[in-house]
Amino acid sequence: MKRIWLGGVLAAVAGLVLAAGCGKGRTEGGGEPAAKPVKLTYSVFFPPMHIQAKTGMEWAAEVEKRSGGRIQIAVHPGGSLTKADQCWQGVINGISDLGMSCFAYTPGRFPLLEALDLPLGWPDGLTATRVATALAAKYNPAEIQGAKILYVHAHGPGILATKKPVRALDDLRNMRIRGTGLSAGIASALGATAVGMPQPETYDALQKGVVEGTFCPIETLKGWKQGEVIEYVTDTKAIGYTTAMFVAMNQKSWDALPADLQKILADVSAEFVDRHGQAWNQADAEGLEFVKGLDREIIALSPEEEARWKEQVAPIVDKYLAQAAEKGLPGAEFLAEVQAMIAQEVAAREANTDLAAAAAQP
């Protein structure tokens, strides 16, 4: 069931990508010699076999196809060109023409968009991806200027994966829990000892006991193989956070493109919003099956425990609002829109569930 707010996502991302204006390109069929192909480098922090790296490669292939080979993109996965926490600056500085990584890997650099990562009970990656792209396009804040954001995607609700069981808030106290950006703040708010760390470093840290657990989407346990080095999964979707990820382009590289190639990038990017969101949902489903296959225990929190966890993380939202206000940013407005979109999606799902249950009655 489509919601009204989702109908504008494709238009929004196209508007975001083209916001800086289009350059002038040569006209087709004018007798001019064919231009040399534009060759771009693309730094992706996901490992090459991860579904999001594959989706990024599919995006690059589609751009090349639509452009008739006039754009050729060399994808460098696994942080081989720039590390995960250096990717944004690498795009700004032209180390890569394109980059995919997490806003949260440069804390404080994106103060308005931090709202996307708050523990708001995100239902799934497709919803998070659509909301993140739509609101980044609508607000187009100063913090993302200097590079051209093509689109944003975001994973499904974060869960807690640990080496020993966490069945209640007290079990988490003083445990060393890996997080990044606001997920590290969530760990601290819950009484754990937060350890900031990008995903590529987490497997070894869990294996060696540097950390005892990690906040992550469940897909990570398969996509990054972290399910091999944990024993328990605590379902914390009640405070489910996401991590928003940019696909950005160096501003000079963008400005150098003719108008028709800019449009191709904008059009393909708009279409890949849902491709990435659906990939996140698929990856979460596969991650769940993966940990079940490893006989890891999946722990459900009681309603009373869920209420305690929600109460513990509430100050994180308050802190975001206070910091945004101090900086003169429309944080309250931005957050209200995020929460309204989540509520709309959850309500629509509940309605569909009720309809399905009614239809199943004899």
Image (cartoon, helix red, strand yellow):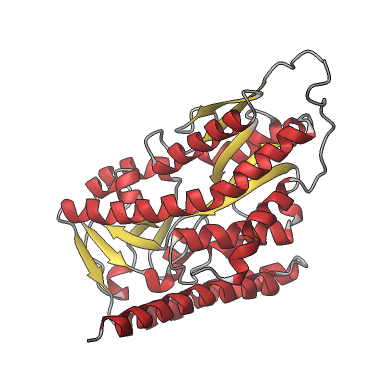
Q: Residue at x 69, y 57 (%)?
A: 12
What x and y, as percent, mark residue 154? 51, 55
Q: Residue at x 55, y 34 (%)?
A: 62
Q: Residue at x 63, y 76 (%)?
A: 336
Q: Nearer the viewer, residue 325 or 72?
A: 72
Viewed as shown, does residue 72 lie left or right of 203?
Answer: right
Quadrant assignment, res 25: top right
Q: Nearer the viewer, residue 86 or 131?
A: 131
In this view, 242 is above or below 308: above
Judged from this view, the residue extending furthest toward the left is 295
State the quadrant of the C terminus: bottom left
What x and y, as percent, mark residue 131? 58, 63
In this view, 121 is above or below 103: below
In this view, 357 is above or below 68: below
What x and y, as percent, mark residue 182? 52, 60
Does any portion of residue 13 appear in the rendered image? yes
